[in-house]
């Protein structure tokens, strides 16, 4: 039996909420305070649902029946009526201002405060190149799973699997950022696992330890006109990454303690790192200090906009020495790890000196300042090992020498 306007007006509140049925699942709910709210009962995927259609008398009986028919059509199209209505309201409120590009740039700006600057710049460039042209101008509420799959597949088809995987992850992070702030209702990139084949791990070229004597002698004889020779020597003695080396500043050097303190802002893992300096490393730094000691950067370059030597200087020097495809700046880290592990040094001390992230986060935080005594000895021993290798002593004999000093 259907309701009439007069019947609805006459409904009185009770101690508990109650409902009166109209037709087609429509009913009116009366609260203990006298409020009257239109409800529509329906089933979606076999489960009972209850949608709110507004308050009486603002929503009249006739209007309530019209709204019931509207949401009924939404349900019959296969969409969840309540979620669809919320999405529509959200779309109307945000469309135009909350495009993927706008929100992604906001997310990148916040994320950049916690990232290595070089990595952050690369991330922005890749998003602008691969993602924004495809979905950048679309409102977040309109982007679907197929839209994202198309973006990722297009990158993967070019053969850049690692970039495709990273961009899929980045898109997902943008949507997580948006959903947490109520800018969209769900994350269409919630599970991109398996969409892109896992790329083969890339290894930086590095010579074998038995080739180290020839390399060290070649560095000693290198006649480049910049700081590449000194930079390669320090790379070998400090195990730092190329970017960390070329951006080194004089105020990071503690001459008294013979330590190099690299701030978190310049480290890949965004945590401060201490490099114990061997006598050989200190000697090289003092030689450079005579040339650039009055500058901010150790490897100062007037020709560079960054005011320090370029990222490719060491790689170009190695190429000129005949090591193209065989050795890189990063290769000095690999070489040190190989030799020191062969010598029998503590793996934890070696990994800490390489500033690698500990897979155990609690252990990593606990051990951050540990192994310093062992690392100081490790760094001096390794510098002595390199000197002996440069003198042409057989590698196996050098390793035996190292073991005696561990």
Image (tube, helix red, strand yellow):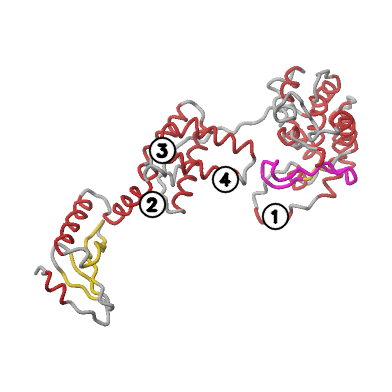
Q: Earlier in the sequence, mark 3 or mark 2?
A: 3
* Nearer to us: label 3 or label 2: 2
Which residue is identified by label 1?
365
| Residue 28 percent location from the top left of the image | 20, 69
> On residue 321, which mark appears?
none
Q: Is residue 269 above or below residue 62?
A: above
Q: Earlier in the sequence, mark 1 or mark 2?
A: 2
Which residue is identified by label 3?
148
Which residue is identified by label 4?
111
Query: Quick one: SS at disc 3?
Result: helix
Q: Is residue 76 visible?
A: yes
Residue 355 covered by magenta stretch: no
Q: Residue at x 40, y 45 (%)?
A: 188
Q: Earlier in the sequence, mark 4 or mark 3?
A: 4
Which residue is identified by label 2?
185
Query: Quick one: SS at disc 2?
Result: loop
Report the front residue among 333 and 115.
115
- Rate crowding at label 1 as few (under 14), some (14 to 19) or many (20 or more) other CA atoms within 10 Å: few
Q: Is residue 49 visible?
A: no
Q: Is residue 339 above or below residue 210?
A: below
Q: Earlier in the sequence, mark 1 or mark 3?
A: 3
Q: Which image quarter holds the C terminus?
A: top right
Q: CA distance from mark 1 to mark 3?
A: 37 Å
Q: Is residue 4 above or below residue 82?
A: below
In the image, the segment drawn in magenta is 253-273
Query: Quick one: SS at disc 1?
Result: helix
């Amino acid at each position: 039996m259907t309701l009439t306007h007069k019947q609805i007006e006459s409904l009185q509140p009770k101690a508990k909420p109650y409902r009166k049925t109209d037709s087609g699942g429509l009913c009116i709910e009366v609260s203990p305070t006298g409020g009257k709210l239109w409800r529509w009962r329906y089933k979606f995927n076999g489960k009972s649902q209850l949608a709110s259609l507004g308050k009486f008398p603002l929503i009249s009986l006739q209007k309530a029946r019209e709204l019931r028919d509207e949401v009924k059509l939404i349900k019959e199209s296969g969409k969840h009526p309540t979620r669809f209505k919320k999405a529509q309201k959200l779309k109307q409120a945000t469309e135009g201002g909350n495009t993927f590009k706008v929100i992604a740039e906001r997310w990148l700006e916040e994320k950049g405060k916690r990232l290595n600057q070089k990595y952050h710049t690369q991330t922005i460039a890749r998003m602008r190149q691969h993602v924004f042209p495809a979905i950048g101008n679309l409102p977040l509420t309109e982007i679907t799973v197929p839209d994202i799959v198309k973006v990722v597949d297009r990158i993967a088809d070019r053969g850049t699997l690692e970039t495709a995987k990273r961009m899929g992850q980045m898109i997902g992070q943008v949507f997580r950022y948006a959903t947490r702030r109520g800018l969209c209702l769900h994350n269409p990139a919630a599970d991109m696992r398996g969409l892109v084949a896992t790329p083969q791990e890339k290894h930086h070229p590095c010579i074998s330890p038995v080739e180290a004597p020839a390399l060290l002698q070649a560095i000693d004889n290198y006649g480049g006109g910049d700081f590449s020779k000194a930079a390669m020597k320090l790379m070998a003695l400090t195990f730092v990454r190329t970017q960390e080396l070329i951006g080194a500043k004089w105020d990071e050097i503690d001459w008294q303690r013979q330590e190099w303190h690299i701030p978190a802002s310049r480290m890949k893992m965004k945590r401060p790192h201490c490099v114990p300096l061997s006598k050989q490393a200190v000697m090289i730094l003092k030689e450079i200090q005579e040339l650039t000691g009055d500058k901010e950067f150790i490897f100062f370059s007037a020709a560079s906009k960054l005011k320090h030597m370029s990222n490719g200087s060491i790689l170009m020097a190695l190429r000129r020495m005949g090591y193209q495809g065989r050795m890189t700046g990063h290769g000095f880290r690999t070489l040190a790890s190989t030799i020191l592990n062969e010598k029998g040094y503590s793996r934890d001390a070696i990994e800490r000196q390489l500033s690698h992230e500990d897979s155990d986060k609690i252990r990593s935080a606990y051990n951050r300042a540990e192994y310093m005594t062992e690392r100081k000895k490790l760094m001096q021993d390794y510098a002595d090992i390199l000197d002996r290798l440069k003198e042409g002593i057989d590698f196996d004999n050098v390793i035996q020498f190292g073991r005696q000093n561990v």
